[in-house]
Amino acid sequence: APAGGGGSGGTPPSSRRTGRSREEPASWSLPSRSVEALEALRDAGEGRGSMPRGGDGTWLGAMQEALADVPVAVAITDMTVPGVTVMWCNAGFERVTGYPKEETEGQNCRFLQGERTEPKVVSKMVRALRKAKELVVKVTNYRKDGSRFVNDLSLTPVHDSKGVYRYSLGVLSDLDKQSREERAAVEQLRELLPRKLPAKAQPLAFDPDDVRVDKRSKEDQYRAAQSMFTRLQWTLCGEESLEMLAANPSAWDALTSFLKASKEQGLADFWMESRKLSTMRGAAKEMRGRTMCEKYLGMSGSETRSMDASAIERKVGEVTSQLANECLPRFIKSKDCASLVEEHVDKTSKLDDSSRGLIWDQYQVPEDLAGFIYSFASFAESFPACIVLSDMAIPGNPMLYVNREFCRVTGFAKKEAQGRNCRFLQGPRTEPASVAIIQDTLRRGADCFVKITNYRKNGDVFQNLLSMRPVHDSNGVYRLCFGVQFEVDGGLDLKQRLHKLSLLLELLPSEVQVPRSGSKAGPKHKKKTRRKEERAEKEQLAEALEARNEIPDSALDMQGEERFADHHDEMLEEIAAAGGSANGHADEERSRGSPPSSRRTGRSREEPASWSLPSRSVEALEALRDAGEGRGSMPRGGDGTWLGAMQEALADVPVAVAITDMTVPGVTVMWCNAGFERVTGYPKEETEGQNCRFLQGERTEPKVVSKMVRALRKAKELVVKVTNYRKDGSRFVNDLSLTPVHDSKGVYRYSLGVLSDLDKQSREERAAVEQLRELLPRKLPAKAQPLAFDPDDVRVDKRSKEDQYRAAQSMFTRLQWTLCGEESLEMLAANPSAWDALTSFLKASKEQGLADFWMESRKLSTMRGAAKEMRGRTMCEKYLGMSGSETRSMDASAIERKVGEVTSQLANECLPRFIKSKDCASLVEEHVDKTSKLDDSSRGLIWDQYQVPEDLAGFIYSFASFAESFPACIVLSDMAIPGNPMLYVNREFCRVTGFAKKEAQGRNCRFLQGPRTEPASVAIIQDTLRRGADCFVKITNYRKNGDVFQNLLSMRPVHDSNGVYRLCFGVQFEVDGGLDLKQRLHKLSLLLELLPSEVQV
């Protein structure tokens, strides 16, 4: 499990874990002026008095003045601003948490959470904030210095006199250090806090009730929106729009006139005439098609002569695509199309409430947005992608509109989805990193593109490519947010649908015109010119589709998939409570008399007829146990292996069993019996190959999971009770045991898991579970189940080791020369035959002049003044082909710049090509002959308890000697050893982390993790390690002294030539913002490109 930060200096570890970041206040008594002001604010909110004097005349100003000198920690959160961020905190907050105002205000308080923060308590807090409920809880939080404390926390909601949920007041206290006086002050303050405020005393940043919009303004807005959405519709439906224009002579004339300016009118004329080809056949059709190609497209007779009917059809398709996807969108955006759009709007649009029925029935459409919203709803209803619209001025940001396609894809009706935040689509497998990206972009009012796992109403999972576009009004207030949800189903038309999606996102507006307002506060964001500052939607969609998004710091809040496990179930329960059908079979179940709770507690399969263990299973397990202890022979059965015999013995056992192979990265289930599906609901095909964490959920106990992880890592037997979740989402208490199995050579091979539903466990089942746990073998004969790779079976002669070492040295020599380009140039220049080889290589690509220029430029350093300038100009003309007019104005500094450019081009472009080529092979071999000899001189760099595999010795020794002086943290791990320990770390790793080699080697690098390490990043690392795939992730790590640093981690798996997953390189790059960051990143990318993924054995 991730460790917290360590101590520093002479401070004992415990003092950093419990010490406050500031001194206790001289007195815990609340100042009398604060008490009086809070009482006055409470009375004013209840309508029993007037606002107190002080502050800036607002309720918020008076609250801040009242709480500023209170010794108790307080934070105020504005619930009308997306992101639930702290808008103000007092000095007491810094005293308790260590975070100063400037690091707190504007942030969500999730930064106080850490590894041991209780998910169950966090869920209570989230629900209380969403539903505006008062709450007092005890929650484990973390100070800025990484130390833990138990936070005695209260949340108090504040509504204004119009019923709008405005603020949440948080009161914090360190429970472990809480004195009687502090406790009394906390209780007194919580009692004094106002629950209401006069709406006039704190106007909303945007208050719909203050807006008065006349009918003409609404109609103008509606027409403007209809014009915009008409253009959007015509652009998205290119071919249909061409047909529509072709049916209107004046419209077609406008298009051809527009295209004439860009000499593309021929395309339109060709397309118009091509429509007649459908009525023609045979030679006449071909003749007509060729004539059209020559007349309108400028093709020659020799080009058209060989064109048959199919070639002509292809040409028609190309022209149609070019017109519809390139020419037509330009025309639609132009002024030339404006009159056509206006004419269309005049004929088809009139502002009325016909779209009202498409919108959330409880939503009060803002007067100043009515035209825009009604126009959007009528446009989006028939669009073939899930489109939603949310109101960002309402706490919780509910969807005020979802279209028909959203209902079809998710299974939820409009009345079930509208009025809710779309988080109800989340479930156990929803990615925390994706949720973090959504929360971060919503809070910032920025575009969002992310791939996320969502759930339909019936519980089915689907992949959702979600795009969000924030909409500000013309006063700069953050008002709405478009959401476009695109199901990634792998259909044949995926590319075409993605193209339409990128077009839609490009055209959706980010601003809507409204009457001018004097409002000066609230959720606003700096305006920006999107097209210049942001990448194209198509590029960002591709990035999201491949899950390459940058994960924001807010992912720190995500403690695993369990955070979202209950969203889907809560939604179904709410629908059922409202009289809807929670699932496709709900009505059928009720008609059969099934109680509502049966889905939450019922088993997925019938109980077995008998809990007795079959006698043949008992006999086989006893024989396997005796064989492992060396007291007997292996039983017959299975495929002749220990694993085959175990699977046959356990197949018919009524108790649930799963076997995990501990030599495979990822701790995945390799086999389970039918009993496992009966208890969990997950069939074999969804279980085998997966880590059993999919059984965890929101109420799974973190402390118990930590025990299980430690037992698995240390090969210890364990019996625990843990809350798990079945496939249907229902909870059960799992009576779980883990039994480690070692082979006769002492290698940790398997873990045997036995599961049982404790709530339903009968006396007979309990007896069967106990009997089975007793029977399970703890050892196996190594010969009865050979390892996929067993080092003891490998015999490698000295010659083979030397050959591997030389090959590795050659590879790492090339790598070193490539990474150190300018130094390598100097080395080659000092060796005439080597330099000749380089210039000969460059001659073929006509780049020899660069090398000659560089070689002669080295003499310039000994020259001065006019002579140097004259020599430099002559060199530029002689070797670089520059003209006299180009060199005439070159002074000394210009010549120096030219030398730098040529040096960079040689070192970073030409030299790497030469080093990879055959022309360089003899130089590399010569270098290896002079400098390398296989011995154990590198042995001292490697973990002293590591038995270097015979068939990898040459490679590992060569790598260690190369990596030791490299200016980036480099580690090497053995993937065949449980826990994947680092067998080697280099000098830079020790410098950056503060850990000596002997402290780091032999351990998994998870010891660098701490409270702020992002679970989403850890999940990416675990997943890629398990799959043996390259990994690139940014992660927060901790040095030995407890300091935090940002680590750009890259991992490269290494398989041997037999296909066995043997090693893993780790390159850890500290992102410190230094001036040489760009140069170091370039070296890092080169290193990663050149590191091998396979080693010959």
Image: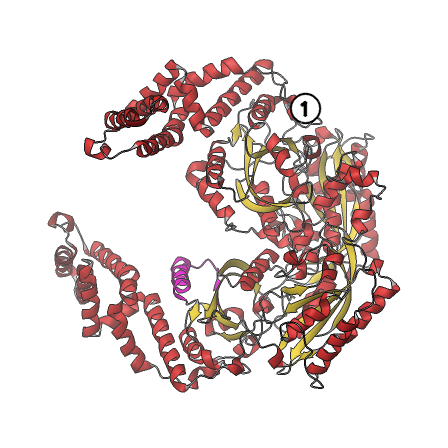
- Kindly tell me whether residue 652 is visible in this rendering: yes
Q: Name which quarter of the figure residue 94 lies in.
A: bottom right
Looking at the image, residue 320 lies above or below residue 734: above
Q: Residues within 10 Å of mark 1 (few under 14, many from 20)?
A: few
- Kindly state the secondary structure of the residue where label 1 is placed: helix
Count of numbered labels shown in the rendering? 1
Q: Is residue 937 magenta?
A: no
Q: Name which quarter of the figure residue 724 lies in.
A: bottom right
Q: Which corner quadrant holds the C terminus?
A: bottom left
Q: Which residue is the site of mark 1?
A: 209
- Kindly tell me whether residue 12 is visible in this rendering: no
Q: Position of residue 403 (x, y in %)?
A: 61, 30
- Residue at image position (69%, 40%) is 457
Looking at the image, residue 1097 lies above or below residue 373: below
Q: Position of residue 756 (x, y in %)?
A: 78, 62
Looking at the picture, tell me which residue is in the foreground, 826 or 527. Answer: 826
Q: Is 51 positioned to the left or the right of 378 in the image?
A: right
Q: Is residue 1070 magenta?
A: yes
- Residue at image position (65%, 65%) is 671
Q: Position of residue 410 (x, y in %)?
A: 64, 38
Q: Which residues are magenta?
A: 1065-1091
